[in-house]
């Protein structure tokens, strides 16, 4: 049953990815780029960063989500950034169709501007409710890893099972936001609805 | 250059032509069909595999993107339905093998290096790479390997069927051509048969049967027409011949009649002439004896001349009678010893020559199959001639011998006498023809004519060689009788 399939990840691969990142960063260093960006995230967040980037390939936004045909696709990070510069590196020069991928960081709920994917790094329930309240009626794919994130109104939640990072999708929430998730992605994910808690 | 079928019968030629043509066509058709099937099937199998590849690649984008090995495994397991796909592998975007099918296959059996997209045949397998892309973003590569054994099995079957078809068709073509070629060869063979019969039996009454109204029918018509023509001409010639033959027979009979009449005439003339001549001669003898004293010398001389001429005329008539009798006589052949005859004659004749110096060289004479009395006449004539014409020689030299050949024997009598001038040779064997005067050598001129007639009746020939004043040689041949080739050596 496809929706029960685990989203697997092998740690040997994580090691390799890490090693590759090190080399990449070394390369960056040698080209005298600011050391300030050199923050190495945990392996877990490296994977999550790649997954977030991959969501742009398997989720479709309605055309009115973009002001113009070639407006950038904005990935927002609310709260503390666990990815360091890794997410920036991942999406650098990448596009979804005509849309350039761009990262924006918001410290507070009020700072949230127009975006298409919002990684919510907030665990507090009340604050979460505020977030969902604020972005209601906008076509924003909300991603988080707090427990019950998807039950509180979030759309995609990362969780770990048997040392593998898997995803859970609140399909109703994505529908409400007029986002269509590719069946290929749905096959990998667990699908939940707010009722069956 | 000669055709390979040059001398074989027309039936085999026709069949060979038909079989070779149909065989070539069949072979070409089968090969073309086979080649078409082969390439079409390869194309189809590539298309099928690439379609499967595209579907699998499209389905496995998320599995690669989110690195879900279970999902990738399950997608690849779906290939179970395609039994000819023996291996499939998903590589991630770094070229590392991520998931593979079937599970029990070791990782090393997959290629390490990823090649360009496309499919190629390797031995008994079709392998290929297919990039896995999501919105132009390459997520990884799919590797597929299909077993072509089934395909080649199928082509083996195809080949076997093709061979079977060729064999069965060839057999069919053989029997069909054997039947159908008769329509062409039958009239030709019939014509050939009739032509052979005509040339061997000379039967121009036969006709070839016309089988169809085609060119062979025309040929048959022309052949029959020709036969009719020949038959008519033959008939004409035959009747003409018969007419001629009748005429010849008629003429021959007439001539024989005339000849017989002539012979009878000459015989009766000679016979009838002999009686009065005898009277003349007899009475003249009496006259000369009774009244010789009453004549003077001149009278007696004249009487003697009359007597001599009467005697000579009697001799002439006797010879003439002999000659004409010879024409009517049948030869009675037996084995004759020529040596005995010659020795016998020689003794008789030698006595009459007195004390002349005569040297005889008698060589070996083979036995002959001949009529002994007439052949004796021949020898008598030739030997007496030889003695007669050598009379004036001081020393007479006569040689009698023979030359033995395969089918005939040549006998000869050679002398060193007066000989004769070869310019008068054609008169030599004529009746009453003489090359010397009676005063020189007596004789009637019938002898050699008789000899020639006897030899001719024996189936032989006679001829002579001579030189005036130096002698003559007379040759005659007698054919050897095949049954009685008995040779006796003379002593």
Image (cartoon, helix red, strand yellow):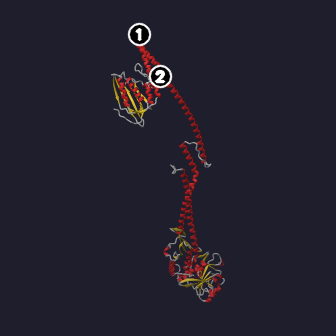
Assign a secondary structure to mark 2: helix
Location of residue B25 (image quadrant)? bottom right
Picture coordinates of residue B51, whole percent (x, y): 58, 71
Residue denoted by label 1 = B294
Q: Chain of mark 2?
A: B
* Nearer to the camera, B134 or B458: B458
- At x 41%, y 18%, the residue is B439
Picture coordinates of residue B444, whole percent (x, y): 43, 22
* Nearer to the camera, B390 or A19: B390
Assign a secondary structure to mark 1: helix
Query: Is residue B139 visible to the viewer in this orientation of the structure?
Result: no
**Around disc 2, counting alpha carbons within 10 Å, would you say few (fewer than 14), some (14 to 19), or many (20 or more)?**
some
Residue denoted by label 2 = B271
Q: Chain of mark 1?
A: B
Location of residue B297 (image quadrant)? top left
Picture coordinates of residue A35, whole percent (x, y): 52, 81
* Nearer to the camera, B203 or B192: B203
Disc ID at residue B310: none
Q: Are marks 1 and 2 on the same chain?
A: yes
**Spatial distance from mark 1 to mark 2, Cα to Cα?**
34 Å
- At x 55%, y 83%, the residue is A165
Vertical arrangement, residue B201 with respect to residue B133, above or below: above
Picture coordinates of residue B430, whole percent (x, y): 46, 25
Query: Is residue A181 visible to the viewer in this orientation of the structure?
Result: yes
* Nearer to the camera, B43 or B201: B201
The quadrant of the rendering that contains the C terminus of chain B is top left
Location of residue B443 (image quadrant)? top left
Vertical arrangement, residue B151 with respect to residue A158, above or below: above
């Amino acid at each position: 049953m496809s929706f029960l399939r685990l989203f697997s990840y092998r740690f040997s691969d994580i090691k390799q990815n890490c090693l590759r990142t090190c080399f990449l960063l070394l390369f960056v260093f040698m080209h005298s780029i600011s050391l300030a960006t050199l923050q190495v995230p945990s392996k877990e967040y490296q994977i999550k960063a790649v997954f977030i980037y991959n969501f742009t390939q398997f989720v479709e936004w309605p055309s009115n989500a973009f002001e113009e045909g070639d407006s950038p696709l904005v990935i927002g990070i609310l709260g503390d950034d666990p990815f360091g510069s890794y997410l920036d590196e991942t999406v650098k020069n990448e596009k979804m169709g005509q849309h350039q991928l761009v990262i924006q960081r918001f410290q507070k709920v009020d700072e949230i501007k127009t975006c298409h994917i919002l990684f919510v790094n907030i665990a507090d329930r009340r604050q979460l409710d505020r977030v969902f309240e604020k972005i209601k009626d906008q076509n924003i794919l909300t991603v988080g890893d707090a427990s019950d994130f998807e039950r509180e109104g979030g759309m995609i939640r990362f969780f770990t099972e048997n040392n593998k990072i898997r995803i859970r999708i609140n399909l109703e929430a994505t529908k409400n936001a007029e986002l269509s998730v590719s069946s290929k992605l749905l096959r990998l994910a667990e699908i939940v609805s707010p009722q069956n808690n | 250059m000669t055709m390979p079928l040059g001398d074989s019968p027309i039936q085999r030629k026709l069949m060979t032509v038909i079989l070779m043509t149909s065989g070539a066509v069949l072979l070409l058709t089968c090969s073309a069909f086979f080649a078409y099937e082969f390439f079409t099937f390869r194309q189809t199998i590539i298309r099928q595999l690439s379609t499967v590849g595209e579907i699998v690649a499209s389905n496995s984008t998320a599995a690669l993107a989110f690195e879900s090995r279970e999902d990738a495994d399950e997608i690849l397991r779906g290939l179970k339905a395609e039994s000819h796909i023996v291996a499939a592998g998903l590589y991630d975007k770094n070229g590392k093998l991520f998931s593979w099918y079937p599970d029990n296959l070791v990782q090393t059996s997959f290629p390490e290096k990823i090649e360009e997209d496309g499919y190629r045949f390797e031995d008994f397998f079709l392998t290929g790479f297919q990039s896995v892309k999501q919105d132009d973003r390459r997520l990884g590569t799919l590797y597929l390997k299909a077993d072509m054994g089934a395909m080649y099995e199928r082509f083996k079957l195809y080949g076997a069927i093709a061979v079977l078809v060729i064999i069965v068709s060839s057999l069919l073509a053989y029997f069909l051509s054997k039947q159908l070629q008769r329509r062409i060869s039958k009239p030709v063979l019939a014509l050939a048969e009739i032509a052979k019969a005509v040339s061997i039996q000379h039967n121009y009454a036969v006709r070839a049967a016309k089988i169809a109204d085609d060119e062979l029918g025309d040929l048959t018509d022309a052949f029959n027409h020709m036969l009719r023509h020949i038959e008519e001409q033959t008939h004409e010639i035959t009747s003409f011949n018969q007419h001629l033959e009748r005429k010849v027979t008629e003429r021959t009979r007439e001539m024989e009649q005339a000849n017989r009449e002539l012979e009878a005439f000459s015989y009766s003339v000679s016979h009838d002439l002999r009686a009065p001549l005898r009277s003349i001669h007899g009475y003249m003898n009496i006259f000369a004896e009774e009244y010789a004293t009453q004549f003077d010398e001149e009278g007696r001389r004249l009487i003697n001349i009359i007597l001599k001429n009467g005697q000579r005329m009697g001799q002439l008539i006797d010879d003439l009678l002999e000659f004409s009798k010879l024409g009517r006589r049948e030869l009675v052949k037996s084995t004759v010893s020529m040596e005995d005859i010659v020795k016998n004659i020689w003794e008789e004749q030698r006595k009459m020559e007195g004390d002349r110096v005569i040297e005889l060289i008698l060589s070996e004479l083979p036995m002959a199959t001949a009529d002994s009395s007439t052949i004796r006449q021949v020898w008598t004539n030739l030997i007496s001639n030889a003695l007669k014409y050598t009379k004036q020689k001081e020393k007479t030299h006569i040689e009698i011998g023979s030359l033995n050949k395969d089918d005939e024997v040549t006998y000869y009598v050679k002398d060193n006498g007066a000989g004769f001038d070869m310019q008068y040779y054609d008169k030599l064997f004529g009746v009453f023809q003489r090359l010397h005067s009676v005063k020189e050598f007596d004789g009637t001129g019938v002898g050699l004519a008789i000899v020639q007639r006897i030899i001719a009746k024996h189936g032989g020939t006679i001829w002579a060689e001579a030189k005036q004043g130096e002698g003559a040689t007379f040759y005659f041949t007698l054919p050897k009788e095949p049954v009685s080739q008995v040779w006796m050596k003379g002593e």
